[in-house]
Image: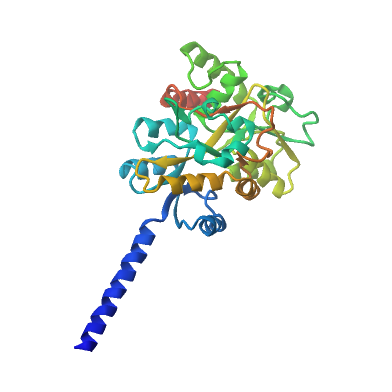
Amino acid sequence: MKLKKLLLGMVAAGLGLGMMASAALAENLRVLAWDGYADPDWVKQFTDSTGIGVDVVFIGSDDEIWAKIKGSEGQDFDIFAVNTAQLQRYIKAGLVTPIDVAQLPNQKEVLPRFRDLPSVGGVTKDGNVYGIPFCFDSIGLIYDTDKVKSPPTSMKVLWDPQYKGKVLAYDNGEHNVSFTALTLGYADPFHLSGGQMASVKDKLVDLKRNVLSFYTTADEAQQIYKNNDVALIWANYGQQQVKALQNVGAHVAYVNPSEGALAWLDNWVISKGVRDKTAAEKWINFMISKKVGGELSQRTGFGNTVTQTGSAGANDKLIWLSDVEDPQKRSDLWNEVKATP
């Protein structure tokens, strides 16, 4: 009888420990992030310093983030990373929770352009902060320093006749319309009138006549560069693309144009279904530390919001990507440009 009671007690204790372990696991911070945004050593450092466990799920596209957050109405994750061009979509759908910036002491130490959050387009609404900028990259201009002796200052150099047949351009209608609109001096490159769109189309047709080839991936651009006489590259992949070229011995440098460089900006966002908002804010504060920011840029080539990098100088003008007036119209326009003899 005593043995039976002992065994029952051991089983009960075992179940209790199992339930405690499950409860502890259930309270782990659930993070949805791009590859490179939640490296194992950072996760370990965060857990060691806060006692908060972290479960990370990596994603590969904006559509995948939306599917996971919208599909569970924000209940499957506590925190996720999303860019400013997408964030308002989540805010309108009620899938995110306002962030208490007072709980983020490291926000006071970020670079000036990221400190005043209302001035960063897309991260606030109705006085609430929904996104904390974490990393970014500009979409600037790569030039071969052996072939372009004077560093260019404007994207207008892509149309310079002396570089005819020596230009690599990116095969994307949405971005090409936007950067060309900036080159033409349009204040809002994401929402164009019919007349402005027609002018952009004519300008892009002129650009096409200067272009050696269009690329879609950074690797493809690198191969074309290695096998051809290329002087200028419209760098859709920014500093990451520069770093890759320099790693294979290319003599290239990078500039952001004076008219403004398109740029993406990824933010940490707290979901509607967050279980422990304090833990989520501790994660954000840790990720915008100088240590993590510096290591992020070193590992990926992306700019971070805490330390200066080659992605943008203090005086560079960055135009954060936003939703556009009609994505299909831009796609159709780009196809017409490419089909022009």
Q: From the viewer's perspective, tell me whether residue 333 is left or right of residue 2.
A: right
Q: Position of residue 79 (x, y in %)?
A: 43, 45
Taking depth in this image into account, of 1 and 24 the one nearest to the observer is: 1
Taking depth in this image into account, of 168 and 240 the one nearest to the observer is: 240
Residue that sits furthest to the left in the current view: 1
Q: Residue 288 occupies which quadrant of the picture?
A: top right
Residue that sits furthest to the top in the current view: 195
Q: Residue 10 occupies which quadrant of the picture?
A: bottom left
Q: From the viewer's perspective, tell me whether residue 265 is left or right of residue 22.
A: right
Against 63, is 149 above or below? above
The residue at the point 48 percent across, 29 percent down is 122
The residue at the point 71 percent across, 22 percent down is 161
The residue at the point 40 percent across, 44 percent down is 64
Q: Is residue 205 visible?
A: no
The N terminus: image quadrant: bottom left
Taking depth in this image into account, of 230 and 173 the one nearest to the observer is: 173
Against 19, is 234 above or below? above
Q: Position of residue 2 (x, y in %)?
A: 22, 88
